[in-house]
Image: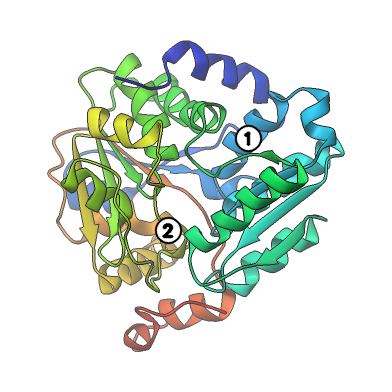
Amino acid sequence: MSGIGLDRIAAAQERISGRVRRTQLALSDSLSARCGHPVYLKLESHQPTGSFKLRGATNAVLSLGDDAKKRGLATASTGNHGRALAHAAKAEGARAVICMSALVPANKIDAVKALGAEVRIVGRSQDDAQEEAERLVREEGLTAIPPFDHPDVIAGQGTIGLEIADTRPETELVLVPLSGGGLAAGVAAAIKARLPRARVIGISMARGAAMHESLRAGKPVPVEELETLADSLGGGIGLENRYTFAMCRDLLDDVVLLSEEEIAEGIRHAFHEEGEVVEGAGAVGIAALLAGRIDVRGPTVVLVSGRNIDETLHRRIVNPGDAAQSAGARGR
């Protein structure tokens, strides 16, 4: 298998220590009662930038040489990676250019700008934004920090798996949001190395799940990016994918897809039962349990990946009776 091993993930953990929070594993009484086994929430939504992406971006930036930082950094993002890279670049005094599509919610664009990064809105898909990021690297000499298919990014996200294994070695199941696969690949690599009997299941949305379609096809394939409550899970995996496709293929035990209504229910549950504001992508693990889509056989960890949801959209979702108008729409 072409992938990232435990040594590289452990090195990332040491590198980002003190710059990224070791997030809480909170017992969910409501989900534990529903599932008949302890269910813990790994609250990556409590990171300073509101999502797990800070781990991979910080590790990637700290792994660069001075010349690469001086040239400036470029990436494509559905929002959270861009915010994380902007944060990491600012800490190192480096220029960052974040390319995003018109489908990215306004609150995520504003958060990137607030950190001093340059924002370029290109097209209506992650693939369109990626083309602009590649042009910046090719023509202007910027250093690429991709959102998922990069060894240092994957290793940084894998530190979550090490924290889970260290804190709850009895874990038998980990539910991970699945998009381009940087998070799922890194976490699965760490969990399978440290807790080899544990299952790792990727959770995505039914609308435009690129990794799922690629795994089903046996190779990376293009998938139309559609509007979804789980906007952070949108975008393709790259037809020239070098790492995450193979790692997800070899390490994930299953992939589960959710409807927009199921994702909305996950957001509502997180707010009303857990006291957490969670974006759609961050709520998919909770949503999968609520929908009865997961066979829970023992202690389970649900990775809550982010909280960066538009406030108006969140209010509509958590207000019973307004869920129908919220499902399938984004905050802009």
187 shown above or below 88:
above
Mark 1 residue element: loop
**Image quadrant in which the N terminus is located:** top left
Q: Amino acid at mark 1?
A: Arg
Tell me which residue sits at (68%, 44%) in the image.
137
- Residue nearer the viewer, 305 or 78: 78
Quadrant where the C terminus lies? bottom right
Write the residue at 51% across / 15% down: 8
Residue 172 appears in the figure: no
Q: Is residue 228 above or below residue 164?
A: below
Horizontally, is 37 left or right of 136 in the view?
left
Q: Which residue in the structure is indicated by mark 2? A: 235
Q: Is residue 154 visible?
A: yes
The x and y percentages for residue 34 are 19, 53
Residue 182, position in %: x, y? 44, 38
Front position in the image: 270 or 324: 324
Q: From the top left corner, tell me how far across and down residue 6 is, in percent.
A: 43, 14
Extreme residue toward the top, this view? 7
Quadrant assignment, res 258: bottom left
Q: Which residue is mark 1?
A: 21
User: Is 206 drawn above or below residue 83 in the view shown?
Assistant: below
> Which type of secondary structure does the marked residue at label 2 adopt?
loop
> In the image as oriented, which residue stretches furthest toward the front?
139
Closer to the eye: label 1 or 2: 2
Seen at 26% across and 68% down, the residue is 262
Circle nearer the N terminus (1, 2):
1
